[in-house]
Each structure stands twice: as C-alpha cells, then as structure tokens.
Amino acid sequence: MRPTPIQAIPDIHIGRAYDQRDPECEIHYETFARLADFFGRNTPPHRHYCFFQVHLLLKGSIRLNLDDQVHFGNAPLLIFTPPTIPHSFYTEQDSDGHVLTIRQEVVRGWYQAMPGQWPDTLLREAVFMELGGVPADSEGDLTALLQTVELLSKEATAERTGRSSLLLAFGQGAFIYLSRLLLLHSKRVPPRYERSEDLKLFLKFCDLVEAHFRDHLTLTEYAQRLALTEARLNDISRRVANRPSKEIVHERLLQEARRLLRFSAVPITEISFQLGFTDPAYFSRFFTKRAGVPPSQFRLSYKA
C-alpha cells in the first residue's frame, strides 16, 4: 500500500490573492487589521515562498506558530518571516499594525549592495521579537524603523510621481533598521538547527536560482550542485512550495523580465539578451506563455 502523499503547506502570493491593484509589485504594504480581516483572524498554516514578510504589531496580542515554534506576545512586537517559512496565527479583533511583504530578489539585492556588513544567516532565521525590552542603544533604530514604515505606508496608498522609487528607498531603509534589530536578537538568542532537511535544501536551491537564473542552468545542473538527483530536487520543490522545480526557475526569470519591462527603457531585444536568451523570439514566446500577453503589450500597459 502506497503511503499517503504529504500535503504541501499553501503558498500565498499577497499581490494576487489579496490586492489586484498591482499584483506583481515588489513591495506590498497593508495594515495588519485589514489583512487579518481578509484572510481571517485565525489564519491557518501558510507560507510565502518568494517573499520576505515583516509584521510590526503595534496594538493587541498574537499567538503565533512560526517555523515549528509557538509564541505568544503582546504588542509592540516584531515578526520576521523569511521565504518558505511556514507560519500561522490567532489574534484578537483589536490587533493592528503594519505588514510588509517584499520579493526575495529585492531584499537580496539590497544586501548584496552592502557586502560583509551582515551575517549570511541573518535572512534565513525566522524571528519573534517583543519590542518592549529593546536595549536603550537600540531604541533609536526601532523608532527609525517605525517612522520609515509609516512613510512607506503613506506612499503605498498614493498614486504619485516617483512612487515606485520611493517605496524601494523606504523599503531598503526599513530593512537596514530591521537588520540592526535582528542582529541584536541573534546575539541574545542562540540559532536553531532543527529545521527539516527538505526546507534547508529548498532554501539552498532558491539561493542557486537567484545566482544563476540568467545562466539558464538545466535542472540536472542545479541538482548536481546540491548533490541531489533531479527527481529528488523536484520532489522537494513540490513538498515545500507545491510547484515543480522548473517553475521556480521560470518564475524568477519571468519576474526579472517584468521588472525590466516596467522600470527600464531598454529595448525588448536587449532585455532578452540580458536574461540569457540567445533568441529574442524565444524570449517573447516564453514571456507570452507565462504572462498571458507579449512583452511589448505588457510594457505598454504600465505606460497608459
């Protein structure tokens, strides 16, 4: 008798599931209360496989399951959730605060621009941090984080010139202040290593995809770099993210194509070469199949 297959924890893409104004945005902001009202105050286990998420709870309390750990706390508190980390929570009706959801490639780009300043593990560990006991020498960073997120929240709800650039600037500033607090937390709390082997390997796979998606490595080459078979890599991807490993690679390529089409004036042919396609016609077919519209039409839709 074959064993019952393990059900993957649902992946939630905030832009597509919740906010259709800009489903492919790089930085998404919403209040905690509005998201909780939409998804439920008793939110079942889920993950965001290609997004970092930051919760700043400023009012109320939360019972949280985060990466196999159970937490309970009263505001103010900080929750940092790296991509793919499962989490679920229950909050009372009066709980509120800020929620930032940011694409992993954006955050990694910020950190790559600051080489050697942060430990490699800083972006891998989920964190639950009560903010009432922050040491005096870190209070300035906490205040600056809250002020920056407030500025970001106001810009996110407006349609003004330069909005996208300001969101990225505020987001980067917020993550620098956040990182200082996470670094403080990592010194006070020993790291845990009981995470499942599948999740560890999937996170390594995502790192490889981020480094090599333009190189168009085959799945066999990705698997070899992880000391896995292609079948094992695909199985891990389906278990953790509920999608085949090939789709992980293609989605990263597609997201970069969307970004270049939206935010640059580079000709589409040149974009195809930048993304490692040797044939612009093949790039056009690749994009059209996955985005539903040709690259030229996609670009025009954001200039209307």
Image: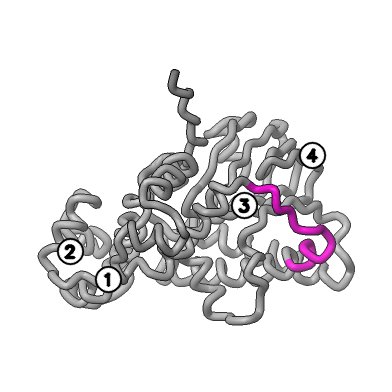
Q: Residue at x 81, y 52 (%)?
A: 130
Position of 268 with respect to 88 (left or right) is: left
265 lies above or below 218: below
Disc 1 from disc 3: Cα separation = 29 Å
User: Which residue type carries mark 4?
Assistant: Phe
Q: Report the magenta residues as a range.
A: 183-195
Neighbour tally class for label 2: few under 14, some 14-19, many 20 plus, Cα within 10 Å: many
Badge 2 amino acid: Phe
The residue indicated by pointer 4 is: 72
**Callout 3: few (<14), some (14-19), or many (20+) C-alpha neighbours within 10 Å?**
many
Residue 177 found in image quarter: bottom right
> Which label's residue is closer to the chain start, 1 or 3?
3
Residue 297: x, y in percent?
A: 17, 59
Evaluate if marks 4 and 3 touch, with contact meaning CB atoms under 8 Å apart: no
Element under disc 3: strand
C-alpha distance separating marks 4 and 2: 48 Å
Describe residue 242's horizontal placement relative to residue 174 as left or right.
left
| Residue tagged 2 | 283
Q: Do the residues under discs 2 and 1 have CB atoms within 8 angstroms?
A: yes
Q: Which residue is mark 1?
A: 275
Amino acid, disc 1: Leu
